[in-house]
Image (spheres, rainbow, N blue to C red):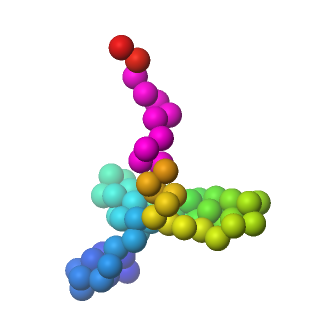
């Protein structure tokens, strides 16, 4: 379904783009499980924080985060 949306030229959300990248690195079943896990974590976080999910802001925050920054 996601590949068909990309082929048709539909807009690609950051979450969909992430799912397609996971599928490219792995097989379809693992990508499906990873997406389900990601969606469950998003649902839990929105319920925990009582806040709406903002896909673009979340992705931008993750890009700017330096969790595994290498020190010189």
Of all residues shown, which one is farthest toward the bottom? 8
Q: Work out whether 42 lies above or below 60.
A: below
Q: Is residue 24 magenta?
A: no
Depth check: give the residue in front, 49 or 31.
49
Please give the name of the residue rendered at 46% of the width and 30% of the height, measured from the top-left corner: 68
x then y, percent, for residue 8: 24, 85
Determine whether, in the image, residue 62 is placed left or right of residue 43: left
Residue 24 in sight: yes
Q: Magenta stretch: give its range.
A: 62-70
| Front residue (pair 54, 4) | 54
The residue drawn where x is 40% and y is 22% is 70
Residue 65 on the magenta span: yes
**Place of residue 41 in the rendered image (x, y in percent of width and height, measured from the top left):** 64, 59
- Residue 31 found in image quarter: bottom left
Quadrant showing the N terminus: bottom left
Looking at the image, residue 11 lies above or below residue 37: below
Residue 68 shown left or right of residue 36 in the figure: left
| Residue at 49% over, 60% down | 57
Quadrant of the snapshot with the C terminus: top left
| Tally of marks | 0
Residue at position x 64%, y 70% in the image: 52
| Quarter location, residue 38 | bottom right
Please state the horizontal and vertical placement of residue 16, each as a whole percent of the image.
40, 69
Side (left or right) of 17 relative to 40: left
Residue 27 seen anywhere in this rendered image of the structure: no
Which SS type dominates the magenta stretch?
Answer: loop
């Amino acid at each position: 379904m996601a590949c068909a949306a990309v082929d048709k030229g539909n807009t690609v959300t950051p979450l969909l783009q992430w799912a397609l990248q996971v599928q490219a690195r792995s097989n379809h079943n693992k990508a499906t499980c990873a997406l389900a896990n990601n969606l469950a974590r998003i649902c839990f976080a929105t319920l925990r924080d009582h806040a709406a999910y903002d896909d673009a802001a979340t992705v931008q925050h993750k890009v700017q985060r330096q969790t595994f920054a290498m020190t010189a």
